[in-house]
Image (spheres, rainbow, N blue to C red):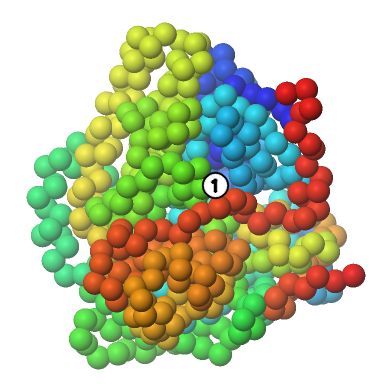
Amino acid sequence: MSAVDLLIVGAGPAGMAAAVVARRHGLDVLVVDDQPAPGGQIWRSVETVAASPRGARLGDSYLAGASRAAAFRSGGAAYEPGAQLWQIEPGFRAFVTSGDKARTVSARAVILATGAQERPVPFPGWTLPGVLTVGAGQILLKTADQVPEKPVWIAGSGPLPLLYMTQLLAAGGKVAGFLDTTPPGRLGAALRHLPAALGKAGDLWKGVAWTLALKRAGVKTVKHVAEIEARGEGRLQSLRYRRQGGAWQETPAEVLLVHEGLVPSIHAPLALDCKVEWRHDQRCYAPVLDGWGESSQPGLFVAGDGAGIAGAIAAEHRGTLAGLAVAARLGKVSAAMAEAEAAPARKVLERELAFRPFLDALYEPRPQVFAPPDETVVCRCEEVTAGTLRARAAVGRPGTNQVKAFTRAGMGPCQGRQCGYTVMHILGSAQNRPPEALGFYRIRPPLKPVTLGELAALEQPDNAA
Amino acid sequence: MFRKLHDPGPSAVTVLIDGKAVSAEAGENLAALLLRQPEGWNRTSTVSQSPRAPYCMMGVCFECLAEVDGVGSVQTCLTTVRDGMRVSRQLGRRMLSA
């Protein structure tokens, strides 16, 4: 068993920033990350791509990751890519698998910088090959310089589809059409948050510029799309869509990319019994944290989008704050010094967070995201449909975990990452209760599947200890 | 389903997918390679045996599972290709075998 002062899980903007500041204050730091290179999802493959011609096509926000990765590499933190965390015990003892070997690491403090995932968007046919998330499309562009072979359909709401389409067009890809699922009236609802968002006028302008560029490029846009269906035998062959109460339109399609915003990755905090709160503004759970990012479990911090969706800049500064707090806790810096060093980070974070209510109101997911038709597969792993869940929901007001036991929804390898929120909403709606009254699945280790061989190879706990 | 915008050139490696040799760029992601194959799928689901393909590309959905060098249920989106790597599409539920 190896021992460090600080274990950081995730090498995206938050994890890298936390590692840099913790190292500067002399902490012994280990960073584990499931990706093969630092950068997280936002800066995926940035070390190799930034220098290539395709780096420029991905834009300045992407290229900014190269200097962060360099600072992280030279900061002196031990870094283990390709490593999956699957359990943390109080105290802390973390269980990590890399290659085909599992091992344990003891740490005096832990920062979870595990980021976000795209909000699951269930609709009939979403399990067909050819349906992916917009984030997946963007990862393929960043890491593999890969675009859909034929003009691609994009359906969704939020900044990411706009950014991906502009990047795709710059790379020479083609968009068949953009089904904008933002419901009517969202802009009006968002406008009251505009004054607070003006501190980030540059980002507001970016959004406008993307929209104008797509218009100039002649991208067909259908606004206020409420329902989508993917159809095909064994793969996506056609796509149906309609506005609220409108007539269905059908079009041939080979690839459809969907996106309805992001949600924090909460499996690790949930498994560790960290207190979480329902964030109605972002329609998801987020851990309850203090101003440094410390959770209800002392010594366990959450930084980055895992703390609530706020973007890469906020993630970095949350990482810095968490790193400082651990340095102060372990006596490497005085509380007063840590507070002084935190001040600039807090200021930036405040500005970034002030921008979110505008974006959250503008891109609040359409209600259909949480109420898919009966034939929709909700749990992709165990193939449980919305209809089955609704039938179960009607008998005896079962909770999320009961329905999991009855139907196997949430028992597959993804452990509810693709169905948890949908199940909460379906049960809540059938029982006339708000989704947060149902709660998320009880999350237990292992957080990622582990083989018996990996478990058997674990060393025994130190007899000396 | 997808195509690569540049030619890997001399850095190409060979990966065997269900015994068929395909060319890949050194250091690239295995799920990305699978999405360039005409078959367009990497496993069949455990209940209805319907074909599935990579969906999230970031390790959370577990749709991209395949058998890699004899190990089942590997997340191909978290796997980097290696020269001579043997990949098999995975059919239905995993079984314990002798």
Q: On the rendered image, what quadrant is the C terminus of chain A found in?
A: top right
Q: Quadrant of residue A398?
A: bottom left
Vertical placement of A320 versus A44: above or below?
above
> In screen coordinates, is B62 left or right of A114?
right
Residue beneath label 1, please?
A: A44
Camera-side residue: A221 or A278?
A: A278
Q: Amino acid at mark 1?
A: Arg
Q: On the rendered image, what quadrant is the N terminus of chain A found in?
A: top right
Vertical placement of B38 versus A168: above or below?
below
> In screen coordinates, is A358 left or right of A340?
left
Q: Quadrant of residue A425?
A: bottom left
> In screen coordinates, is A169 left or right of A31?
left
User: Residue shown at 10%/60% (left/top)?
Assistant: A188
The answer to whether any part of residue A254 appears in the image is: no
User: Residue shown at 45%/29% (left/top)?
Assistant: A298
Camera-side residue: A361 or B7?
A: A361
Per the image, label 1 sits on a secondary structure element best described as loop
User: Residue shown at 37%/27% (left/top)?
Assistant: A292
